[in-house]
Amino acid sequence: MKPKILVTREVFSEALDFLSRHFDVTPNQADTPMNPEALAEALADKDGALTTLSERIDDALLARCPKLKAVCNIAVGFNNIDLKACQARGVMATNTPGVLDASTADFTWALILATARRVTEAEQYLRAGKWTGWKLKQFLGTDVNHSTLGILGMGRIGQAVARRARGFDMTVLYHNSRRLSAEVEKDCHAAYVSMDDLLARADILSVHTPYSPATHHILGAAQFAKMKPGAILINAARGGVVDDAALVEALKRGTIAAAGLDVFENEPALHPDFLRLTNVVLTPHIASSSEATRRRMAMLAAENLVAALTTGKPPNLLPPPA
Ligand code: DGY
């Protein structure tokens, strides 16, 4: 008898076909979100699960899934999974590192440019039929070229964002939990600075840290107060890394000039004031969402699940190597 697995949300057909060759698959191609109760019921008799960041995998859930041996997230982030609970209950957990770095870095640049040059604000104005003709002072933005890019969190995605800054002749500064090797710094044309220096010197600050208790609200009122008044904040990493209420206040008061946000503290709910502010560009957690990348993410998660349940050695077992 094949092991039984649940795919919690809609996935590409090639991932389902691959999984079906190895497992008895319960899919969810209707993409119906599962609340904790529905998830526990669906997982009660399953050996494995292909999950997304929308499902919380915690001890209360695992306690109700005695057969579960592997949870494979279709995401590089894994803050939806309680790794300690998984380890305590002998459940393997995996993520999808590496395959989404370039797409996420590209999209970070989309946010940087859209925010600095007021692209969505100007488009909304045009679509609303308000444009009466060219004006010298219309939608004056901030130059990205020759400005200073600050990167908080210099992992693979932060590095990919830094490398793309060369084309804009930018100065790149970064802060990270540990300093990178001289070789990587050279490759990224990036200089290591303290957190305070980063905040004080960046014209554009882009955050790329994973979310964990250690990074909860790592950017809040105190940090915004240390930034330049004309500075721009970009977050395509995780909600909760930024204190959204404090950001709304900083944007209203002009403590910082603008923000480009792909992720939010309580997504899909947004702080309501974001919708009223014109100096913020908002997108619905799509930074990795090119078709090729989302296909690769789903396939890698499926490969992790097959390896986990057949060999006990999935390639992307969590926690990640130091
Ligand atoms: C990730 O991989 O963690 C992304 O946020 C999902 O799009």
Image (spheres, rainbow, N blue to C red):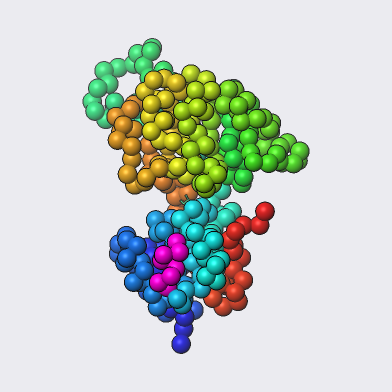
Q: Quadrant of residue 196?
A: top right
Judge whether 27 appears above or below 110 on screen.
below
Residue 270 shows in the view? yes
Residue 210 at what x, y percent from top left? 54, 46
Dividing the picture into quadrants, the one containing residue 164 is top right
Question: At 50% from the left edge and 27% from the top edge, which residue is drawn?
Answer: 222
- Please tell me whether residue 320 belongs to the stretch shown in magenta: no
Q: Is residue 217 above or below residue 93?
A: above
Q: Which portion, as a residue range, is magenta?
A: 58-65
Q: Position of residue 67 (x, y in %)?
A: 46, 77
Q: Residue furthest top?
A: 136
Q: Residue furthest right?
A: 182
Q: Residue at x 34, y 47 (%)?
A: 268
Question: Foreground: 59 or 139?
Answer: 59
Left or right of residue 27, residue 218 in this image:
right
Indicate whether 176 appears above or below 64.
Answer: above
Name the residue at the bottom extreme. Answer: 1
Coordinates of residue 112 in the picture (x, y in percent): 48, 32
> Which residue corresponds to the image point at 36% horizontal and 46% vertical from the top-left?
267
Q: Quadrant of residue 255?
A: top left
Say whether residue 27 is visible: no
Reply above or below: 5 against 104. Answer: below
Q: Nearer the viewer, residue 264 or 30?
A: 264
Residue 10 x %, y % = 37, 63
Q: Residue at 52% x, 37% y: name it.
A: 218
| Between 302 and 17, the one nearer to me in the picture | 302
Q: Please state if 192 lies on the left or on the right of 20 as rendered.
A: right
Which residue appears farthest toward the left when viewing the image? 129
